[in-house]
Image: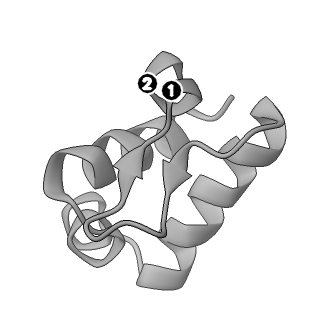
Amino acid sequence: MNPKHLETLVSVADRGSIAAAAQVVGLSHSAASLHIKALEEACGAPLLDRRRKPPTLTARGKLA
């Protein structure tokens, strides 16, 4: 697991949006989304529930 990917996930959880998290960690929105996607692929499960506004961590996301 890439530490920068985890930093992005934590930032999304703290700030409630991928766009806000991307600014904080110095990424574009699309790059931050790719970080989350890479983590989800590595874990084999969704880490964020994107259907909710704001996006929230899934049970698996809380463990990551």
Q: Nearer the viewer, mark 1 or mark 2?
A: 1
Q: Mark 2 is on which residue type?
A: Lys
Q: Tell me if mark 1 has few (under 14), some (14-19) or many (20+) residues whose alpha carbon lies within 10 angstroms of its own.
A: few
Q: Are marks 1 and 2 in contact (CB under 8 Å)?
A: yes
Q: Which residue ends up furthest to the front in the rendered image?
A: 52
SS at mark 2?
A: helix
SS at mark 1?
A: helix
Pinpoint residue 54: horizontal percent, then vertical percent. Answer: 25, 66
Front residue of 52/23: it is: 52
Pinpoint residue 51: horizontal percent, then vertical percent. Answer: 47, 70
Front residue of 10/25: it is: 10
Q: Residue 17 occupies which quadrant of the picture? A: bottom left
Pinpoint residue 63: horizontal percent, then vertical percent. Answer: 50, 17
Q: Which residue is mark 2?
A: 62
Q: Which residue is mark 1?
A: 59
Residue at 58%, 55% in the rendered image: 36
Q: Is residue 61 left or right of residue 14?
A: right
Residue at 51%, 32% in the rendered image: 61
Q: Mark 1 is on which residue type?
A: Ala
